[in-house]
Image (cartoon, rainbow, N blue to C red):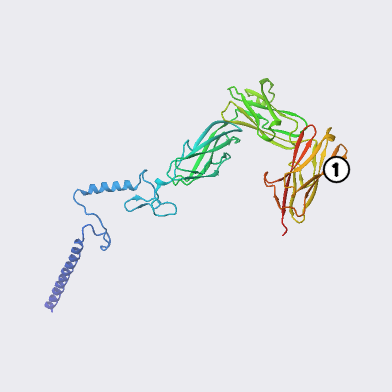
Amino acid sequence: MIRFLAIVVVAIVVGILLGFAGHSRNFSGVTERFEQRPIGVPMKEGSPFEPTPVTKQFPGQEETLKDEVEKNKSTEEGSSDKPDSPLGNIGSGFPVNVPAGNSIAPFQTDMAPKAQLINGSSHDFGTMQRRAKKSHTFIIKNVGNSPLDLKVEGSTCKCTIGTLTKSQLKPGEETGITLEWKTETSAIEFAQSAEIKTNDPRQPMLKLTVKGVVVDKLLMEPDVLDLGEFSTNEAHSKKVHLYSFTKEPVKITKVEWSEQANANLISFKHREIPLSEITDENFKEATQVFEITVDLAKGLPQGKLNGVMRVETDIEENSLLESGIIGRGVGDVTFLGGKNFNLEYNILELGQIKQSEGKETKIFLSLKGPNRDKVELSVRSEVPEDAVKVQLGQPTVRDESILYPLEIVVPKGGPLSNYPGTSTSNFAKIVLKSKSEFEQEIPIYLRLVVTADE
């Protein structure tokens, strides 16, 4: 029995040894198969069925590969000479330029227009007097090979941007655009800009900038001369003072009126006065004082006066100091109107009228003063005669005035008319002439729209 058990144990041990030997041969075969893989495809850590391609290392090649890696890394980090591309790098690493429309066809930049600001995109006015005005003209040139389109996009500031003399420039052509700046800001320093849109693919928007420093070298007092209500039958004189706070001597080179229509009736004189005549403590630091006399002659048009006195000095080149002059002229003739008549601006509201109905209205002219009996009145219309008929009625005497009715008729069946009065250019107009010592014209503006019947 013992012998039998010993034989069984020996058999089991031999079987185990033989099995282990067979398994070892199979594992060796698998290992040998993977060791015979192609060069450059080693086993990856993890699953042996996920090889990673590599380059076979040869003796001495390790440092070479390291140098190549560092070189490639430097290239990938980018150089300032390498242009950007919306699609990045493709294939060999050459950039792809994508034109408008996302077309993959290369854009020929050599054939594109190219805008160049000949005298720069920024101008420094330097020191500017407050409420003075300066301007600068930027020169734009097309240095490309196709037409350059330009459009004023707008201003981001209070500066005034002029119009382009040319909106399209052929290759080699140039044009100018002027920025004008009036220093009404309360700040000491200013920087303002305007934009010009182009079809230059490199710079679709040109930004023009002006800057400077504002100082109070000169000061006008008052800065606005309000005449109030004044008689146009009499001459008037008013005075304005110009104070200088500079160490350098100042001279006034020119004083002029902004409105050409009545410039022959407004004149100016100026003289330097002693500092001892300054009584206002606010100007005791002034180094010079000028007295400017504003002379209004007889015969100024009745109604609203609104203009600017422009003063030039030798303190700054190409700059103007401005002071407003406002008031309302009244003469022998004044108007008496109803709720539809604006006395300040002499505007009569006739409104919208149907062609088949027409309209009649009446306002009164009042003549006062010592010359009331000598005044000759006449009236004319500056709209088609068949659209508006105007007639002076018989006068009546009332206290110290003479009243004339002024009848204004839009006839039935008259022509269609469109005078909405939304701007100074689309009013209808009646002109009243008054002649006594001198002749005056008094305008009456009409808002009038005649429409067809529905």
Picture coordinates of residue 228 (x, y %)?
74, 35
Q: Above or below — where is 280 with respect to 76?
A: above
Q: Position of residue 274 (x, y in %)?
A: 67, 20
Q: Quadrant of the N terminus?
A: bottom left
Residue type, label 1: Gln
Q: In this view of the protein, which residue sits in the foreground, 142 or 246?
A: 142
Residue furthest left as drawn = 3
The residue at the point 79 percent across, 31 percent down is 437
Q: Which residue is drawn at the image coordinates 74% and 47% (left, top)? A: 385
178 left or right, relative to 202? right
Question: Which residue is the extreme one toward the bottom?
Answer: 1
The quadrant of the image that shows the C terminus is: bottom right
Q: Residue at x 23, y 57 (%)?
A: 40
Residue 362 seen in the current view: yes
Q: Position of residue 414 (x, y in %)?
A: 75, 53
Residue 362 percent coordinates (x, y): 81, 47
Residue bearing the label numbered 1 = 394
Which structural element holds mark 1? loop
Compared across the picture, whether 438 is left or right of 34 comes to right
Q: Residue 157 vs residue 23: left or right?
A: right
Image quarter of residue 102? bottom left
- Mark 1: give few (<14), some (14-19) or many (20+) Cα within 10 Å: few
- Specify the quadrant of the image occupied by residue 331: top right
Between 148 and 19, the one nearer to me in the picture: 148
Identify which residue, 90 or 187, lies in the foreground.
90
Where 286 falls versus 67 (above or below)?
above
